[in-house]
Each structure stands twice: as structure tokens, then as C-alpha cells.
């Protein structure tokens, strides 16, 4: 062979250098002698890649684990705060309920007392009004008593005496049903709460009681009723005007 360089081979060798790593054992002129393998210096590896390059493998970090732990902590704190808010609301509602219940019980007790007081006042007012009416009717009863005494007994007084006596009895019966009680008994022990002594009769000599009189054990007794007295529902409206003996 001649010692002149082949232009075609030289061109191929230059293109091979531009395309990739030079094969060890291959002459620059493209000879076939030697092993065909790439050298370490010419073979790029993932570990020797430039930072930020396509072949670079990023180092593992603990960012994901830290974010997970932070999320769990935040979730626990949120749950605890939510429970505290719920418990506080329940306590506030319970206190408000107890306050309203106590106020309602006091209001109910006040209303019951007010109702009882009003009922008692109405009853007392009705009783006073009835007592006032009875007090106004007492002079009428006194006049009827005087008229009957003037006309005499019904059997001997004729038609007028009987009519007057009947009207008097009817009026007394109606008032008695409503609670009026007549105080006109004689020969009974003197009671200053229902009797008003306006006269005194001499006592019987030697301890003898007058004929027809009941024994009172030596106490003062009603000898004569000069004007009848009345009690209205247990209360004395007017004491009886009497003459006592003893």
C-alpha cells in the first residue's frame, strides 16, 4: 500500500469522533485491530451527570414524611379544638336551660300564689258584700218582729197576722240557707260575745229559779230578749239585746 492518507478514511474518522466516544483499541484511522469497547472516560454515567441535567438522579428527601406528620398533628389539634367547642356549647346550653327552668318554676309559683290570693280576696269581698246586705236587712226583720208582736199570735191575729208571720218565716228561711243564724234564745247562759246586756233582773230568792226558767248553775242567764241578734256564717253581725238575771 502507498503511504498516502486515504481521504475517505480520514473523513470517516472525523465524523466518528463527532458522533460518539472513541473506541479503545480502534486506531484513529478506523482500523479493525483491538477490542471494540468504550472507555470509562468517554462513557457518560448517571452518577457523573451534570447537576440539573437530564441524567441526574435527585437525592431522596424526607419532605413527604414531614408533611404527613404535620398534617396528622394539625388534624389532632383541630379535632381537640372542635370537641372543646362542642363541650363549651353544651355547658352553655345546659346553664341556659337550668336558668329558664328556674325562672319558669318561680313564675309558676308566683302565678299560683296570685291565683289563690285573688280567689281568697274575691271570697272575702263576696262575704263582706253579703254581710253588708244582711246588715241592711236587719232593720226590716226588726220591724217584722215588732209587727208580729203588735198583731199578736197568728191564730188570734186574723188573716193579716198569718200573712205577716208567713212572710217573716220565708225571709228568715232564705237567709238561714245562706248562713244567717238568729240569736233569740232565752234561759241560756249569758255570752258576752253574742249578748248585749241592757237590763238586769233580780235573782230568785233562796236559790230558786223563776217558773219556766232553766237552771244555769248560778251563772248569769238570759232572762228576756229585747231585740234579736244575728250571726252571719259564724261571725256576729249584731249581738242580741237582752236582760240578764243572776
Image (spheres, rainbow, N blue to C red):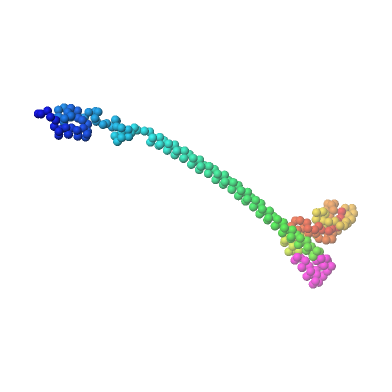
Farthest residue to the front: give it: 4
In this rendering, does residue 214 appear at all? no
Magenta-highlighted residues: 143-171
Give the side of residue 10 with respect to residue 66, left or right: left
Q: Position of residue 165 (x, y in %)?
A: 78, 67
Q: Position of residue 126 (x, y in %)?
A: 72, 59
User: What residue is at 16 percent from the left and 32 percent from the top?
Assistant: 10
Q: Nearer the viewer, residue 40 or 166?
A: 40
Q: Which SS type dominates the magenta stretch?
A: helix
> Relative to 212, is 109 above or below?
above
Quarter placement of the N terminus: top left
Quarter placement of the C terminus: bottom right
In this rendering, does residue 154 appear at all? yes
Q: Position of residue 167 (x, y in %)?
A: 76, 68
Q: Nearer the viewer, residue 1 or 93?
A: 1
Answer with the quarter of the image where residue 212 lies.
bottom right
Q: Position of residue 73 (x, y in %)?
A: 44, 36
Farthest residue to the bottom: give it: 159
Answer with the quarter of the image where residue 209 lies.
bottom right
User: What residue is at 74 percent from the left and 58 percent from the top?
Assistant: 128
Farthest residue to the left: give it: 1
> Relative to 91, is 121 above or below?
below
Q: Nearer the viewer, residue 234 or 36?
A: 36
User: What residue is at 19 percent from the left and 34 percent from the top?
Assistant: 15
User: What residue is at 24 percent from the left and 30 percent from the top?
Assistant: 42
Give the side of residue 162 with respect to residue 22, left or right: right
Total marks shown come to 0
Residue 55 belongs to the span the image colors magenta: no
Amino acid at each position: 500500500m502507498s503511504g498516502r492518507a486515504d481521504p475517505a478514511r480520514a473523513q470517516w474518522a472525523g465524523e466518528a469522533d463527532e458522533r460518539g466516544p472513541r473506541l479503545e483499541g480502534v486506531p484513529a484511522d478506523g482500523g479493525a485491530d483491538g477490542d471494540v469497547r468504550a472507555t470509562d472516560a468517554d462513557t457518560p454515567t448517571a452518577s457523573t451527570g451534570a447537576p440539573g441535567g437530564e441524567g441526574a438522579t435527585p437525592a431522596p428527601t424526607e419532605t413527604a414524611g414531614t408533611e404527613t406528620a404535620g398534617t396528622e398533628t394539625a388534624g389532632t389539634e383541630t379535632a381537640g379544638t372542635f370537641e372543646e367547642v362542642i363541650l363549651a356549647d353544651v355547658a352553655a346550653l345546659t346553664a341556659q336551660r337550668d336558668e329558664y327552668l328556674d325562672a319558669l318554676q318561680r313564675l309558676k309559683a308566683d302565678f299560683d300564689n296570685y291565683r289563690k290570693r285573688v280567689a281568697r280576696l274575691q271570697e272575702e269581698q263576696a262575704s263582706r258584700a253579703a254581710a253588708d246586705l244582711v246588715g241592711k236587712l236587719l232593720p226590716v226583720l226588726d220591724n217584722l218582729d215588732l209587727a208580729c208582736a203588735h198583731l199578736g199570735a197568728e191564730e188570734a191575729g186574723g188573716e193579716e197576722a198569718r200573712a205577716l208571720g208567713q212572710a217573716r218565716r220565708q225571709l228568715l228561711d232564705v237567709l238561714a240557707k245562706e248562713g244567717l243564724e238568729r240569736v233569740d234564745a232565752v234561759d241560756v247562759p249569758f255570752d258576752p260575745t253574742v249578748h248585749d246586756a241592757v237590763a238586769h233582773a233580780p235573782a230568785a230568792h233562796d236559790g230558786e229559779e223563776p217558773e219556766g226558767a232553766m237552771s244555769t248553775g248560778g251563772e248569769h242567764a238570759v232572762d228576756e230578749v229585747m231585740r234579736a241578734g244575728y250571726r252571719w256564717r259564724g261571725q256576729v253581725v249584731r249581738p242580741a239585746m237582752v236582760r240578764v238575771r243572776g
